[in-house]
């Protein structure tokens, strides 16, 4: 039987993944442990947390309210043990190796590391920015930021935000081609295409209802997200890109969102550390700073 804090942690993993098997992988336990923990919580609370069948898991109305309270309770317990993190005036030294996607790394991670370095000048950061999936253990990464599902059960991971995808185009291009009626129109219009450096193949566009498409007439192809964004801004084609890249351009009017009703459900952005226990002060300090600094960012 799990204690109440472990029950809450297990519940939150199930809530964040909406998949008991993925929650089990994240927690390094069996799916049966997750199922038992959820049932035990439901019995103790007297409320149904998830609507479950063989195909899907959906949160109940009570679950949505309870998740916020559970997260606050777990964070409060974690804060009690934060005394393991050195005080601001205590000297912390050494190298911390960090991996992050380029977009989130430049915009969000760098300012966090800058603030941390000012408080702890003895720290040295080795930041590697890449869209490729890396072997964090083999490359001796201490702390990482990952967009999408984190399936490696060796890591201690916490979801901090969500990554949204938007189909966007420059106003001048939209004036020329006219309004889009459906996603099928993308096959006859100029689009951009991003190459997955892990496979050498194009990234498919992800739509709602778990649909994926690959528009048939790319006018610009690249393996760099920023270059793709620049091409869309120039009116070379319609592109699908992450919110972190296009949010400012959407606010300024430099880009317009098209077919917003086809947008997929955002995917998680997580902070993870490779080492479970013991955790050196420099790594714990960096991990917590990234968790707090990235929590709730619009990515």
Image (cartoon, rainbow, N blue to C red):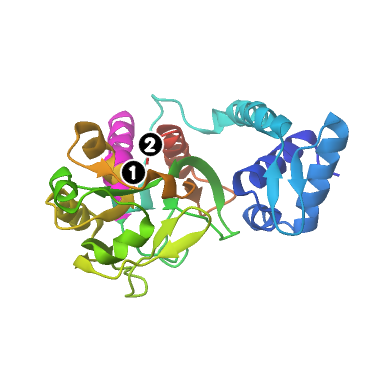
The location of residue 132, given as percent across then percent down, is 36, 64
Element on which disc 2 rests: loop
Q: Is residue 94 above or below residue 204?
A: above
Prevailing secondary structure of the magenta residues:
helix
User: Which quadrant of the view contains residue 76?
Assistant: top right
Label 2 to label 1, Cα distance in Å? Answer: 7 Å
- Residue at the image position 46 percent from the left and 43 percent from the top: 162
The location of residue 21, given as percent across then percent down, is 69, 58
Q: Residues within 10 Å of mark 2 (few under 14, many from 20)?
A: some
Residue sitting nearer the eye, 282 or 179: 179
| Quarter placement of the C terminus | top left
Residue sitting nearer the eye, 116 or 292: 292
Q: Is residue 114 magenta?
A: yes
Residue carrying label 2: 298
Q: Is residue 149 magenta?
A: no
Residue sitting nearer the eye, 7 or 245: 245
- Residue at the image position 56 percent from the left and 55 percent from the top: 155
Residue sitting nearer the eye, 261 or 35: 261
Residue carrying label 1: 243
Q: Is residue 234 above or below residue 77?
A: below
Q: Is residue 123 visible?
A: no
Q: Is residue 276 visible?
A: yes
Mark toward the start of the polypeptide (2 vs 1): 1
Q: Which range is magenta?
A: 103-128
The location of residue 201, given as percent across then percent down, is 33, 74
Horizontal side, residue 191 vs residue 261: left or right: left
Element on which disc 1 rests: helix
Horizontal side, residue 12 vs residue 99: left or right: right
Q: Which mark is residue 261?
A: none
Horizontal side, residue 61 vs residue 294: left or right: right
| Quarter placement of the N terminus | top right
The reply to whether discs 2 and 1 touch (Cβ–Cβ < 8 Å) is yes
């Amino acid at each position: 039987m799990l204690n109440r804090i472990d029950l809450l942690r297990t519940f939150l993993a199930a809530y964040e993944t909406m998949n008991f098997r993925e929650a089990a992988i994240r927690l390094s336990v069996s799916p049966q442990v997750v199922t038992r923990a959820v049932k035990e919580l439901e019995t103790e609370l007297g409320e149904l947390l998830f609507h479950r069948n063989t195909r899907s898991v959906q949160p109940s109305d009570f679950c949505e309210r309870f998740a916020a309270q559970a997260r606050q309770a777990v964070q409060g317990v974690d804060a009690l043990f934060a005394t393991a993190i050195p005080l601001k005036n205590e000297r912390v030294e050494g190298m911390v190796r960090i991996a992050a996607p380029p977009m989130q790394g430049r915009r969000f991670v760098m300012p966090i590391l800058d603030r941390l370095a000012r408080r702890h000048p003895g720290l040295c950061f080795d930041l590697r920015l890449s869209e490729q999936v890396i072997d964090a253990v083999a490359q001796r990464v201490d702390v990482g930021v990952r967009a999408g599902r984190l399936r490696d059960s060796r890591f201690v991971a916490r979801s901090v935000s969500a990554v949204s995808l938007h189909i966007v185009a420059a106003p001048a291009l939209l004036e020329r081609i006219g309004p889009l009626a459906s996603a099928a129109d993308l096959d006859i219009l100029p689009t951009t295409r991003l190459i997955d450096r892990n496979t050498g193949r194009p990234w498919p566009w992800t739509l709602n209802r778990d649909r994926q498409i690959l528009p048939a007439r790319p006018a610009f192809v690249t393996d760099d997200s920023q270059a793709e964004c620049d091409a869309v801004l120039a009116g070379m084609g319609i592109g699908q890109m992450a919110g972190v890249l296009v949010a400012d351009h959407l606010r300024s009017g430099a880009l317009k969102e098209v077919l917003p009703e086809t947008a997929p459900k955002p995917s998680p952005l997580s902070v993870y550390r490779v080492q479970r226990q013991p955790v050196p002060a420099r790594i714990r300090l960096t991990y917590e700073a990234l968790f707090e600094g990235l929590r709730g960012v619009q990515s």
